[in-house]
Amino acid sequence: MTDADGVLAARFAATYDALDTRDWPDVLRRAAPTDQRRKRMLLVAVTMAVIIVPTAIAFRGAIHDLFFGTPAPPVITRTFAGQNEMRAMATTKVLRLTLWQISWTRNRRSMCGNGGNEASEDEKTIRR
Protein backbone atom coordinates (compact mmCIF):
# COMPACT_ATOMS: atom_id res chain seq x y z
CA MET A 1 0.00 0.00 0.00
CA THR A 2 1.41 3.37 -0.98
CA ASP A 3 1.22 6.57 1.01
CA ALA A 4 -1.59 7.84 -1.22
CA ASP A 5 -3.64 4.73 -0.42
CA GLY A 6 -3.22 5.49 3.28
CA VAL A 7 -4.48 9.03 2.77
CA LEU A 8 -7.50 7.77 0.84
CA ALA A 9 -8.21 5.11 3.46
CA ALA A 10 -8.10 7.76 6.19
CA ARG A 11 -10.53 9.98 4.28
CA PHE A 12 -12.96 7.13 3.68
CA ALA A 13 -12.68 6.03 7.29
CA ALA A 14 -13.72 9.52 8.35
CA THR A 15 -16.96 9.19 6.37
CA TYR A 16 -17.84 5.73 7.77
CA ASP A 17 -20.85 5.65 10.04
CA ALA A 18 -21.10 2.54 12.24
CA LEU A 19 -24.73 3.32 13.06
CA ASP A 20 -25.78 3.49 9.41
CA THR A 21 -28.37 0.77 8.80
CA ARG A 22 -28.95 1.45 5.10
CA ASP A 23 -27.86 -1.26 2.72
CA TRP A 24 -27.76 -2.06 -0.98
CA PRO A 25 -31.05 -4.02 -1.10
CA ASP A 26 -32.74 -0.96 0.38
CA VAL A 27 -31.32 1.17 -2.43
CA LEU A 28 -32.47 -1.32 -5.05
CA ARG A 29 -35.93 -1.53 -3.50
CA ARG A 30 -36.33 2.25 -3.56
CA ALA A 31 -34.98 2.49 -7.12
CA ALA A 32 -37.31 -0.20 -8.49
CA PRO A 33 -40.18 1.14 -10.54
CA THR A 34 -43.37 1.49 -8.57
CA ASP A 35 -46.85 0.81 -9.95
CA GLN A 36 -47.40 4.54 -10.42
CA ARG A 37 -44.12 4.90 -12.32
CA ARG A 38 -44.95 1.88 -14.51
CA LYS A 39 -48.39 3.32 -15.30
CA ARG A 40 -46.83 6.66 -16.21
CA MET A 41 -44.27 5.01 -18.53
CA LEU A 42 -47.03 2.97 -20.17
CA LEU A 43 -49.13 6.11 -20.65
CA VAL A 44 -46.21 7.94 -22.27
CA ALA A 45 -45.49 4.98 -24.58
CA VAL A 46 -49.12 4.68 -25.67
CA THR A 47 -49.38 8.45 -26.22
CA MET A 48 -46.26 8.45 -28.38
CA ALA A 49 -47.57 5.48 -30.38
CA VAL A 50 -50.93 7.21 -30.91
CA ILE A 51 -49.13 10.29 -32.24
CA ILE A 52 -46.32 8.69 -34.25
CA VAL A 53 -48.07 5.75 -35.95
CA PRO A 54 -50.89 7.70 -37.67
CA THR A 55 -48.47 10.45 -38.67
CA ALA A 56 -46.09 7.94 -40.22
CA ILE A 57 -48.96 6.24 -42.06
CA ALA A 58 -50.32 9.57 -43.34
CA PHE A 59 -46.94 10.79 -44.60
CA ARG A 60 -45.46 7.48 -45.74
CA GLY A 61 -45.62 8.49 -49.41
CA ALA A 62 -44.01 11.87 -48.78
CA ILE A 63 -41.32 10.37 -46.58
CA HIS A 64 -40.62 7.68 -49.16
CA ASP A 65 -40.35 10.30 -51.91
CA LEU A 66 -37.74 12.22 -49.91
CA PHE A 67 -35.37 9.29 -50.31
CA PHE A 68 -36.53 7.58 -53.48
CA GLY A 69 -38.28 10.34 -55.47
CA THR A 70 -37.54 11.58 -58.98
CA PRO A 71 -34.36 13.59 -59.56
CA ALA A 72 -34.44 17.36 -59.35
CA PRO A 73 -34.99 19.36 -62.54
CA PRO A 74 -31.84 20.47 -64.40
CA VAL A 75 -32.30 24.12 -63.31
CA ILE A 76 -32.14 23.18 -59.64
CA THR A 77 -29.22 20.79 -60.22
CA ARG A 78 -27.25 23.58 -61.95
CA THR A 79 -28.09 26.02 -59.13
CA PHE A 80 -26.79 23.63 -56.48
CA ALA A 81 -23.68 22.88 -58.56
CA GLY A 82 -22.97 26.63 -58.84
CA GLN A 83 -23.40 27.12 -55.11
CA ASN A 84 -21.10 24.20 -54.37
CA GLU A 85 -18.49 25.66 -56.71
CA MET A 86 -18.70 29.05 -54.97
CA ARG A 87 -18.26 27.38 -51.57
CA ALA A 88 -15.23 25.48 -52.84
CA MET A 89 -13.64 28.71 -54.13
CA ALA A 90 -14.33 30.48 -50.82
CA THR A 91 -12.82 27.59 -48.86
CA THR A 92 -9.74 27.64 -51.08
CA LYS A 93 -9.34 31.40 -50.55
CA VAL A 94 -9.64 31.03 -46.77
CA LEU A 95 -7.05 28.25 -46.80
CA ARG A 96 -4.67 30.32 -48.93
CA LEU A 97 -5.15 33.32 -46.62
CA THR A 98 -4.45 31.17 -43.57
CA LEU A 99 -1.30 29.73 -45.14
CA TRP A 100 -0.19 33.23 -46.12
CA GLN A 101 -0.71 34.43 -42.53
CA ILE A 102 1.38 31.55 -41.20
CA SER A 103 4.21 32.25 -43.64
CA TRP A 104 4.01 35.99 -42.87
CA THR A 105 4.22 35.23 -39.14
CA ARG A 106 7.27 33.04 -39.69
CA ASN A 107 8.97 35.68 -41.83
CA ARG A 108 8.21 38.40 -39.28
CA ARG A 109 9.54 36.25 -36.47
CA SER A 110 12.77 35.54 -38.34
CA MET A 111 13.18 39.28 -38.97
CA CYS A 112 12.67 40.03 -35.28
CA GLY A 113 15.79 38.11 -34.41
CA ASN A 114 14.70 34.97 -32.64
CA GLY A 115 16.20 32.99 -35.49
CA GLY A 116 13.09 31.08 -36.32
CA ASN A 117 13.83 28.49 -33.65
CA GLU A 118 10.88 29.19 -31.41
CA ALA A 119 7.29 28.84 -32.63
CA SER A 120 4.82 31.59 -31.86
CA GLU A 121 1.69 30.91 -29.83
CA ASP A 122 -0.43 31.05 -33.01
CA GLU A 123 1.72 28.43 -34.71
CA LYS A 124 1.63 26.19 -31.65
CA THR A 125 -2.16 26.41 -31.68
CA ILE A 126 -2.32 25.65 -35.43
CA ARG A 127 -0.01 22.63 -35.09
CA ARG A 128 -2.22 21.04 -32.40
Image: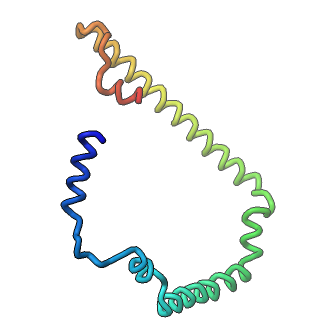
Q: Which residue corresponds to the image point at 69% horizontal and 86% vertical from the top-left?
A: 54
97 shown above or below 21: above
Colouring used for the render: rainbow
Q: Which residue corresponds to the image point at 20% horizontal and 53% vertical from the top-left?
A: 10
Q: Which quadrant of the rendered structure holds the C terminus?
A: top left
Residue 23: which quarter of the image?
bottom left
123 shown above or below 7: above
Front one among 94 and 78: 94
Front one among 53 and 101: 53
Q: Is residue 75 left or right of residue 38?
A: right
Q: Residue furthest left?
A: 14
64 shown above or below 74: below
Q: Position of residue 91 (x, y in %)?
A: 52, 35
Q: Is residue 22 left or right of residue 3?
A: right
Q: Position of residue 71 (x, y in %)?
A: 79, 57
Q: Position of residue 1 (x, y in %)?
A: 30, 42
Front one among 83 and 120: 120
Numbered circles on residues, count: 0
